[in-house]
Amino acid sequence: MLTKINETATFLAGKMQYLPKVGIILGTGLGELATQITERQEIPYQDIPNFPVSTVEGHSGKLIIGKLGTTQVLAMQGRFHYYEGYSMKEVTFPVRVMKALGVETLLVSNAAGGMNPDFEIGDLMIISDHINTFPEHPLRGKNEPSLGTRFPDMSQAYPASLRDMAKAIAAKHGIKVVEGVYVGTSGPTFETPAEYYYFRTIGGDAVGMSTVPEVIVAVHAGIRVFAMSIITDLGVAGKVVEVSHEEVQQIANQAQPKMTLIMKELIAKL
């Protein structure tokens, strides 16, 4: 693992004029942010040593190096999912590389099904905490002390300071945001009504198929995290409707400008 991380980081560092302080996983709802990165270089995942290749429609699969405003960033356009058949170590490998390159803060986005009865389709949810239901843990196995402690504390996985900054930005622009707990599941099926009920009962506000593994590894590595979901469908009692991947993408595209604005201004304050 260390050899692969160092090999990949060395390859990417050779293409950078400045090392990035901010990493971005451009999941659902953040594709538009990629177009605003200046002084950019784009590297397809297949050209990067040791990188997996994204197979999901809507995830283009390239690393973008450049600037957002005056901040040097490293952005993943397309993430890796456990349901694609990757191991958790493969899913989270890019986060390890980000840390090796000097990234201190990670911004993440996703699409999620809302379970809080106060949520509506199209809402932006700032993630305050998560519940991990994935069947494999990204830190399972022998711990490498140089990457992080054996038993990382997860009580502040999503620092209140970053969440408060994002809420202030949203309020300034009149953008509605909600806050809640994200439940991470393996997918790729959407949830049954009984599963939605279960996840709500155990404390979840929204559910999705990503983010949690990357956040766990980021915390293990000492990286601060800010994450946000677009509520693209509802799993609330009396509101559960059939949903497709295409419909999720359509809702996410409509919410993109608002999320992009919040993320861009948040990065400027880091």
Image (tube, rainbow, N blue to C red):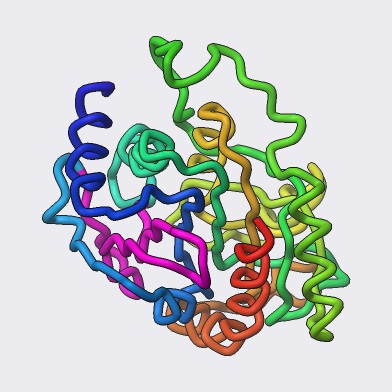
Quarter of the image holding residue 124?
bottom right
Q: Residue at x 32, y 64 (%)?
A: 64
Quadrant of image for the N terminus: top left
User: Residue 102: x percent and y percent?
Assistant: 43, 39
Q: Is 125 inside the magenta-drawn segment? A: no
Q: Is residue 79 left or right of residue 27?
A: left
Please state the extent of the stretch shown in magenta in the rendering: 51-80
In the image, residue 110 sits, relative to residue 217, either above or below, namely: below
Q: Residue at x 59, y 86 (%)?
A: 257
Q: Is residue 170 left or right of residue 210?
A: right
User: Residue 193: x percent and y percent?
Assistant: 67, 62
In the image, residue 154 sits, relative to residue 129, either above or below, namely: above
Quarter of the image holding residue 177?
bottom right
Q: Is 74 inside the magenta-drawn segment? A: yes
Looking at the picture, tell me which residue is in the foreground, 58 or 170: 170
Q: How many numbered circles does the render carry?
A: 0
In the image, residue 48 sits, relative to residue 137, either above or below, namely: below
Looking at the picture, tell me which residue is in the foreground, 134 or 9: 9
Q: Is residue 22 left or right of residue 162?
A: left
User: Residue 163: x percent and y percent?
Assistant: 77, 55
Quadrant of image for the C terminus: bottom right
Q: Residue at x 79, y 75 (%)?
A: 170
Q: Residue at x 21, y 37 (%)?
A: 10
User: Residue 159: x percent and y percent?
Assistant: 75, 43
Q: Is residue 124 left or right of residue 117?
A: left
